[in-house]
Structure formats: C-alpha cells, structure tokens
Amino acid sequence: MFRGQELLSNRPDPAIAADLRWEPFPRPNDALYVHAETKVAAIMRSESLTEAEITIDNTVCGTRDFDRDKAWTCDKVLPSIMPPKSRLTVWATDDGGKMWARGVYVGTGERIRK
C-alpha cells in the first residue's frame, strides 16, 4: 500500500523505467518496473519526493537466501533508481502480519537519466 493505493507486483509497467539507465541489458530489467517498491521509486522520481513509505505483503526480493546473490533485485537496485538522498521505508510481511521487517533505502540516483 502506498498512499492508500494498492500497487500490484503482478502488473508490469515498463514505461516507469523510461527515465532510467538499464545497461548492460538491451531493455529494462523487470526489477526496475515490476515490484511495488520500484513503482513507488518511480512515483518518487516523477513527483520529486524525498520521503516515502510502503507496506508490502512479501519480503523484498534480494533479501532471501535463494535470491540474495542475484544481481538485479529490489534490495540492490532500489537506491540507484530513487532520487539522490531520498528515503524509502519498506514495511514487509509474508505471514499475514504476524512478523514484520523494516528496511530503509537511501537514494543515490545513479541509474536515473539526467
């Protein structure tokens, strides 16, 4: 949930990655436009937000044992696609809210086209 709106990870929107550099790939990697966290990063870029908070019903990809070593995950990519010095707080649960994880990402903006 972001601003009371449900952002679905199963609805890819490649257009939100149009302002990003995605080298070395010939087109944007889906880590840049599929998950709810990257959709909030796109909103942060378009509205010049310096702070945002999102609640997701899964763990952030790249924080789990099976995907921690993958190069393109939200955990690794998020800072680079957020405005420089911006902060995104992600509240995550994958058990219906019994346990929560909180991550704070600080933007570097290094993948945003100037």
Image (spheres, grey):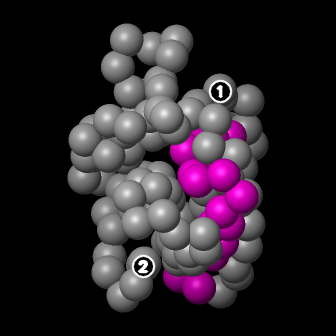
| Disc 1 residue crowd, few under 14, some 14–19, many 20+, Cα 10 Å | few
Q: Is residue 77 magenta?
A: yes
Disc 2 packing (10 Å; few <14; some 14–19; many ≥20): some
Q: Amino acid at mark 2?
A: Met
Quarter of the figure that contains the N terminus: bottom left
User: Which residue is labeled 1 in the image?
Assistant: 71
Question: Please, what secondary structure does the residue beneath circle 2 have?
Answer: loop
Label of residue 80 in the image: none
Residue 78 vs residue 45, the one in the foreground:
45
Start-end of magenta stretch: 74-97
Quadrant in which residue 14 is drawn: top left
Identified at 57% across, 52% down, the residue is 82
Does residue 64 appear to the left or right of 33 in the view shown? right
Percent coordinates x, y for residue 51 in the rendering: 61, 74
Query: x%, y% of residue 24?
Result: 52, 12
The amino acid type, in three-letter code, at marker 1 is Ala
71 relative to 96 in the view: left or right: right
In this rendering, does residue 61 appear at all? no
Residue identified by numbered label 2: 1
* Residue at the (45%, 40%) spot, across then down: 32
Compared to 43, does 66 lie above or below? above
> Where's residue 2, x and y in %?
42, 78
Instruction: Give the answer, above or below, for where 93 lies relative to 40.
Output: below
Determine contact: label 1, label 2, CB under 8 Å: no
